[in-house]
Amino acid sequence: MSTIRGVLYRVGQFLNSHRYAVIIAWLVLAGGLKLTAPSWTSVATDGDLEQLPADTTSARAARLNRLAFPEDRALSSIVLVFAREGVPLIQQDRQFILAMAKTLSERTDLPFSTPRSDEGPDLSVWTERTPVIGPMLKNESGSAQRVVVQLTNDFMATDNIRVLEVVEQTLLQFQPQAPAGLAMGISGSAAIGGDMLSAASESLRSTHLTTLLLVFTALMLIYRSPRLVVIPLLVITLSASVSLDLLALMAEFSQNHPDLWPTIRVFTTTKIFVIVLLFGAGTDYCLFLIARFRELLDTDSHRVESQGEAVAQSLDRVGLALAASALTTVVGLTMMGFAEFGKFAYSGPAIAVSLLVTLVVCLTLAPALLSTPLAAPRSNGAAKTPDAVSSEQRRAASPWWNEIAQRVTRRPGVVLAASLLVALPLAWHGWSTPVSYDLYSELPSGRISRQGTRLLQRHFPPGELGPLTVLAFSPDAELDTAEGRIAIARLVKPLTDLPGVAKVRSLDQPTGDPPGTVRLGSVEGLAALAAKSNPQTKAAFVSTSSPLAGEVTRLRLVLDHEPFSAEAVATCDRILETLNQMKVDKESDWYGATFELSGPTAGIRDLENITQSDRRRIEVLVAGAVFLVLLLLLRRPLVCCYLIFTVVVSYLVTLGLISLIFQSFDGYAAGTLLTGEVAWAGVNWKVPVFLFVILTAVGQDYNIYLVTRVFEEQRRLGPIAGLRKAVVQTGSIITSCGLIMAGTFVSMMTGSLRGMIELGAALSLGIVLDTFVVRTILVPAFLALLARRK
């Protein structure tokens, strides 16, 4: 340890002697990366369901669908909804709808799933005139109708932002010509995806600006010196520039060389995390380095001879702690790479790379800047740094930390027991906090796709937003024959009877009527009969291409609930259970068949299963890895175990508090009382994983700063006196760092995505708890108990 500190001292001397060369080198590197790196948007990947492993049900269904129905290239859709309240659509409405659909179909800038042909119907823009499908686009009362635009874009393809803008412009262009009383809206998976991507981009911009303002304000309040504020601002700004450009270059290289390891992928949300964590951690690193630098220049008992000597000794005394705390965070984030879900697996290591860059910049550029006139002592008092006061004066002005140190160390057992008694009920609530996978509910209510979806749900079954597709593969079957149609009807019947299933569309009943029913006395019944005999029906529901011709059939299930809801996922489970029973029943027509599910609900079910498994794996790996780093640094197994315990308690308490806060304010006020929407159903599914990883990794930074200082002071002053001195000496700076880190997480709440708001609130609250409860009370009380035993 002393050898490493000696090396750091010599590094500090080198940086002081070559300060301007170091500063210029970093500026040249940052400029070079800025010129060569691709833009973030060109390499960023988006979407959640697209990051699922290849062996999930929805992924297998996608492969089977491409093989059995190669002509079906649609991956998402835009749905235009037209409705009148309480009365059927009139002839002028229908003419207006067809005119708008025709205009959309003639556009050349939309990625239609089927190339437009002058011969035959347009199969990319579905209207009431589309064979087979047309009758399904109207509701039963005739008061509403849909136009469906089939697209080759994925649900969360970045191009859907542009597609949504094109469709919205077309809608606005036609709006003045709309018949009076006709309501119009835009919905569909591509619209929701485009809105989510737009909201993510807006969140990124607002987070970046808010983070800069918060950090600048905090630094001005701490230092009250523009000269000294410039140093951390330069360090973290350059760190952010180098990190983001380096990640963009690495992501581009991985895209061009997909077979090379390691693979780096970045997302829009990755940039948000990089900015927030980098500004928070980078500011913390600078604050601790500058605090020790000022202490060495200001304190009479530790005063050094020169500014350069203060730089070298500062790096020598806190450099190892900074490196250890950064390593703890990096190791914790890297453990996310063992996840199966791509967004977890790639985000963690990418953020870890940015923190490594930040650490290197802070340990080299910050000391070089501290050696310049920016941090030079005042001429009228050589010992004083700019606008600084002595540490003795700071302690006299703030008796708070002296009082806390005295109280905690005087009766540590009582303090510790009382704190845990208050925390345990909240931790228990956090343990049982529900998790929501409803992607649709992440969007704010003012988004155009959210408004269009509400219009759709008023006139159509909620499941029409995204029907569930069942692909049934029966080897050597002849499903395109009369016997095959009977087998399909026997497959449909038990599915239709399941609770939560509104209708099943199949080769036997293309419009979704119950099996065996014929409604000859109605227009809808005649349309259903015509659809059965239409040759396009067979192509839509049974495979006609080799090598699976006649062996695969598709069923379209419209559920009673929104496709992203927990109720829809539960129905999906019942459907799979029923299908699995049929394929093992030797008396069934479908014995030995293979069933796969696709659609939004199937994707959400896979996402839930994979991320829950990842959550357990990540929690164990992160806690274990951070424990090993702590053990390597502190070499006190009992202390290390306790530090991990405090972080777990802090995590559970934070989760419990966030659950109570959002359930009370968001669930009732925003959800039920004002808009009539469904009340809060749980924290967003990303919150528990990222909260645990960041709190465990970043939260240990402050513990490391405190505990290493405690051990240092105990060697000089003894167990209890050293502990008290360490609490007093580190109190203000750790509190400042904690508040800055919490503030950077608050900036995540300035966006509009619900999940990001919840995560920002949870991380801010968690860091505050770590700063004011864990570091101030729980850790000192435990160390005091150990000291008394000795």
Image (cartoon, rainbow, N blue to C red):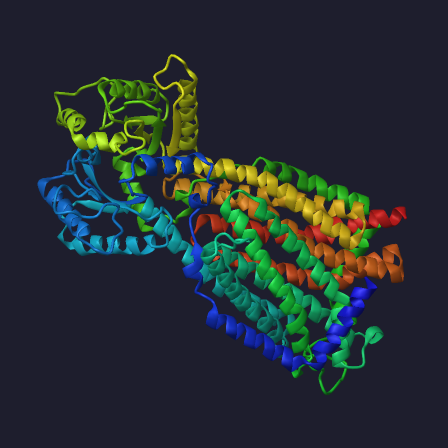
Above or below 552: residue 394: below
In the visual, does 421 lie left or right of 68? right
* Residue found farthest to the top: 587
* Residue found farthest to the front: 547
Residue 728, picture quadrant: bottom right
Give the x, y percent position of residue 212.
52, 67
Q: Residue at x 71, y 58 (%)?
A: 324
Residue 159, picture quadrant: bottom left
* Residue found farthest to the bottom: 379
Residue 507, picture quadrant: top left
In the visual, does 95 lie left or right of 715? left
In the visual, does 659 lie left or right of 415? left
Front residue of 384 and 578: 578
Residue 378 visible in the shown view: yes
Give the x, y percent position of residue 612.
54, 37
Front residue of 24 and 727: 24
Give the x, y percent position of residue 272.
50, 58
In the visual, does 99 lie left or right of 515? left
Quadrant for the N terminus in the image: bottom right
Q: Residue at x 57, y 54 (%)?
A: 349
Give the x, y percent position of residue 303.
81, 76
